[in-house]
Image (tube, grey):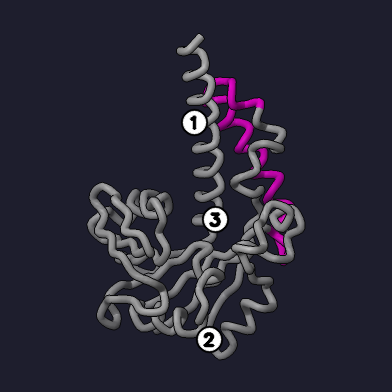
């Protein structure tokens, strides 16, 4: 019984990991990288850095967070977005995922990211206008952008805005495909592929994530 319980929860964990990674990769497909070196501001445990490492190589990456992460092969630093401890033009690309909305002085953080970047700054933020996403957000902690408020913050910048439809990462308790927790990995891969095709039909200004690419050249 003990082994069954352990395997049961491990299967759930494996499924959630695959589901999160599937959506992360959907987001990153929307981002054309202009360069080979990248800093992830607010990198957390490094899940995005690990995907970037597949194409850029771990030695070309760095991560920064308020708590220093340990990511094998990737340099990490402790710090905040409002004061990046790097020289100007240190990285080709500066990337952030759902970090900017947590920062008090957003304009200062944006200026710091631009200072450190040689070519582009990439912002990925959950969309306040997405009702499904909004239903799963703790509004005491998260103060998300809408496309309009993010565009206002970026006024005067040269940027391109895209949208990625997805389902909230932490909503496995109500997500119908949680049944795939208990099926072989190939089943979830097929299901995710079909879900991705459906999501593609709904991408637009109310999609779950906003992707902004800012040129600093």
Tag 1 residue: 14
Tally of marks: 3
**Is residue 174 toward the left or the right of residue 189 in the image?**
right
Task: Say which of marks 1 and 2 sits in front.
Answer: 1
**Which residues lie in the magenta part?**
179-207
Residue 191 in the image: x percent, y percent? Answer: 63, 32
* Residue name at image x 56 percent, y 47 percent: 23
Residue 96 drawn at (x, y percent): 46, 66
**Residue that sits furthest to the front in the current view:** 140
Disc 2 packing (10 Å; few <14; some 14–19; many ≥20): few
How far is mark 1 from mark 2, CA to CA? 41 Å
Q: Quadrant of the C terminus?
A: bottom left
As drawn, the residue found furthest toward the bottom would be 156
The reply to whether the C-beta atoms of the residues labelled 1 and 2 are less than 8 Å apart is no
Residue at the spot 50% in from the left edge and 44% down from the top edge: 21
User: Would you say residue 117 sits in the magenta stretch?
Assistant: no
The residue shown at (66%, 26%) is 179
Circle 2 is placed at which residue position?
Answer: 157
Task: Write down the quadrant of residue 86 in the picture.
Answer: bottom left
Task: Between label 1 and label 3, give the one nearer the viewer.
Answer: 1
Distance between the Cα atoms at labels 2 and 3? 22 Å
Q: Secondary structure at mark 3?
A: helix
**For residue 117, above or below residue 135:** below
Q: Position of residue 68 (x, y in %)?
A: 31, 58
Q: Main secondary structure of the magenta part?
A: helix
* Residue corresponding to mark 3: 27
Circle 1 SS class? helix
Give percent across and percent down for residue 131. 76, 57
Q: In the figure, 74 relative to 17: above or below?
A: below
User: Residue most toward the right?
Assistant: 131
Callout 2: helix, strand or loop?
loop
């Amino acid at each position: 019984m003990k082994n069954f319980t352990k395997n049961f929860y491990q299967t759930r964990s494996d499924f959630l990991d695959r589901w999160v990674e599937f959506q992360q990769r959907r987001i990153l497909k929307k981002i054309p990288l202009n360069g080979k070196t990248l800093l992830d501001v607010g990198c957390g445990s490094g899940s995005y850095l690990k995907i970037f490492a597949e194409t850029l190589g771990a030695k070309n990456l760095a991560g920064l967070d308020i708590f220093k992460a340990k990511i094998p092969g990737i340099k990490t630093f402790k710090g905040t977005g409002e004061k990046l401890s790097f020289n100007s033009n240190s990285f080709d690309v500066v990337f952030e995922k759902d970090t900017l909305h947590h920062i008090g002085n957003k304009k200062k953080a944006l200026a710091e990211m631009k200072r450190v970047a040689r070519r582009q700054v990439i912002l990925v933020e959950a969309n306040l206008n997405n009702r499904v996403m909004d239903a799963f957000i703790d509004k005491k902690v998260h103060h998300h952008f809408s496309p309009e408020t993010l565009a206002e913050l970026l006024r005067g910048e040269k940027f391109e805005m895209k949208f990625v439809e997805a389902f909230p990462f932490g909503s496995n308790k109500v997500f119908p495909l949680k049944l795939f927790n208990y099926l072989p990995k190939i089943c979830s891969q097929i299901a995710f592929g079909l879900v991705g095709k459906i999501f593609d039909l709904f991408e637009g200004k109310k999609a779950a994530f906003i992707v902004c690419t800012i040129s600093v050249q």
